[in-house]
Image: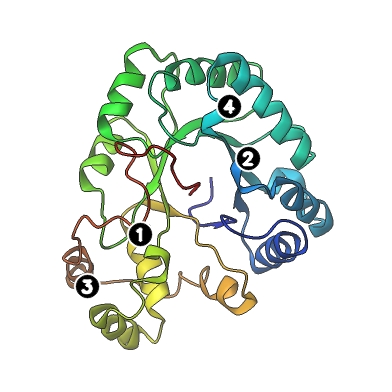
Amino acid sequence: MPIIGFGVYKVEAGTETVDSVKEAIKAGYRLIDTAAIYQNESGVGQAIRESKVPREELFITSKVWNDDQGYDSTLKAFDESLKRLDLDYLDLYLIHWPVAGKYSDTWRAMEKLYKDGKVRAIGVSNFHVHHLENLLKDAAEIPVINQIELHPRLNQEQVRNFCRNQSIAVEAWAPLGKGKLLDQPELIKIADKHQKTAAQVILRWHLQNDVIVIPKSVNPSRIRENIDLFDFTLSLKEMKQINALNSNERFGTNPDKYESPQPE
């Protein structure tokens, strides 16, 4: 799985999705992250076809939405996502949120999809430690990844440590804090030193913390900027400075408190 990918949350279905995904693939992205609730899987599929990049070189992720959770409904939802994407298989399929009373049955369906070869890996999204502990009690397969809100103001250290101990990779959605961290003086100072942008510094911080990132943009120059992360390294001092920005501040829904979560 690539360590940096392209997210399409809130990218408009149709031309905007097709154009931005094609631009991302052209820029070198090979991981594309979508979800049923984003309503742009068809556009992602069209962009993949039009990119002319061989399917086996791409890593495509989608997610089962809350309303479709449960055993039979998850199997159906997967087939519908695959049809919209016009693909023969997915590289990764995730439980989008830990819906109480449902995610264990959803996971059994995910395990079947994996065993049947319809998806190459299965994982979860927005799971706290207690959700993971509950899931692992009866799971035949350990989730390969947990995709969570993660950025310098919400470093999710407890979840990351648990996942590391369970050999579960961590992937960050909203890795740039939904753009709310880009004017942070500490980040700008570090960025100026490396002749980079604050966004690039934040994304590099993630990578050096062994976190996979899926930044989103529909701006071609930003799309290229967000993958240009491999010609500089943050020092231990700089990493500590960024770590110190943590305030456990969420910009999205807390998985423990949602009633009708936003579809991150």
Q: Residue at x 61, y 51 (%)?
A: 32
Q: Are marks 2 and 4 in contact (CB under 8 Å)?
A: yes
Label annotation for residue 206: 1
The earlier-in-sequence mark between 3 and 1 is 1
Q: Residue at x 48, y 20 (%)?
A: 107
**Nearer to the camera, 215 or 253:** 253
Pointer 3 residue: 238
Using the numbered discs, state the Cα–Cα distance from disc 2 to disc 4 in whole angstroms: 10 Å
Pointer 2 residue: 36
- Asked which quadrant contains residue 133, the reply is top left
Q: Amino acid at mark 3?
A: Glu
- Asked which quadrant contains residue 213, the reply is bottom left
The earlier-in-sequence mark between 3 and 4 is 4
The earlier-in-sequence mark between 2 and 1 is 2
The earlier-in-sequence mark between 2 and 3 is 2
Q: For this view, does 145 lie left or right of residue 185?
A: right
Q: Amino acid at mark 1?
A: His
